[in-house]
Image (cartoon, helix red, strand yellow):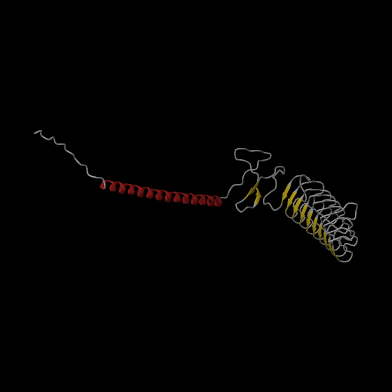
Amino acid sequence: IGNFNTGVGEGALELNNMDSNTAVGSAALLLHVRGTQNTAVGTNALVFNGSGDVSGDFNTATGYAALMNNVVGGSNTAIGWEALTVNVDAVNNVAIGTLPLSRNTSGSNNTAIGNLALESSVANSRHVAVGRMAGSGITIVQNNVIIGHHSGVHSRFGQEDNVCYIGNIYGANVDDFGTVARPLLVDPDGRLGTVRATPTPSFKNPGKTSPQPEAIPDAARQTMLNLELQNLEATISQQQNQIEILTAQIQEQIEQIHKVNARLEMNKPAAQIIVNKTKAVP
């Protein structure tokens, strides 16, 4: 029953009576009764979708047991082995990899890319995790960004809302006393990193020290100075060339003026003297 459906595989779309669904694989969309425009590719993909009183629409599941237990959740994308496999009613999730968001049941608006990314999250929402096991320790917080392999699994300050974790930043993460975060720098190659906290020469603090910029090595400093000097020399040379060109143009204009004046003098008529003579009266 239903129109514009495609079912390929044992039990695919077995109970379907809705429109525009695609199921490829054994038991794909097996118990689907309500819901439209779903795509299930793989054994047990979206098995329970739309089996409740409310339809589950606009889902895409590719991989074994992807979105298998989804009942009423909509607009989810699960690509990979058991991706979002226990999702029930959550919406707007994206899970790509092996077991990403595999325990999520009702958390919405999450993006998990990488094997086991956000795999412990059950009802948490608005996370972005990219990398193997990225954010895999998150269980109770919301709205985090986690980038990098195994990043954001644990936090020394406990789980927090509204934070960003990025892995593979070189250098220490906090100062020697473990309470002050490091400032983040970008080196000339575009690499992110932190700096060590060192006391200033004029102030001795037996306790915590303020983060200070890391000293630039002499060789690097000399290279920077040489580059600046080369740029300055090139600028001066360019300006000198412009001055010489302007000087030549002005001199040429002066010579043209002299030539015009000379021609005017040559073409000027000679002055004439008129003498009035008085005639004698006869």
User: Residue 209: x and y, percent?
Assistant: 66, 41
Question: Which x, y percent locates residue 237?
Answer: 44, 51
Residue placed most toward the observer, 12 or 227: 12
Residue that appears at 73% across and 49% down = 165
Q: Position of residue 183 (x, y in %)?
A: 66, 45
* Count of marks overlaid on the render: 0
Q: Is residue 102 left or right of residue 187?
A: right
In the picture as drawn, the residue positioned furthest to the front comes out as 282
Q: Quadrant of residue 282?
A: top left
| Residue 259 appears in the figure | yes
Q: Between residues 247 and 53, which one lies in front from this camera angle? A: 53
Up the image or down, 273 lies above or below 149; here it is: above
Judge left or right: residue 172 versus residue 65: left
Q: Residue at x 28, y 46 (%)?
A: 264
Left/right placement of residue 241 relative to residue 269 reads right
Residue, far bottom: 9
Q: Is residue 35 above or below residue 161?
A: below
Indicate the quadrant containing the N terminus: top left, top right, bottom left or bottom right. bottom right
Does the image show residue 195? no
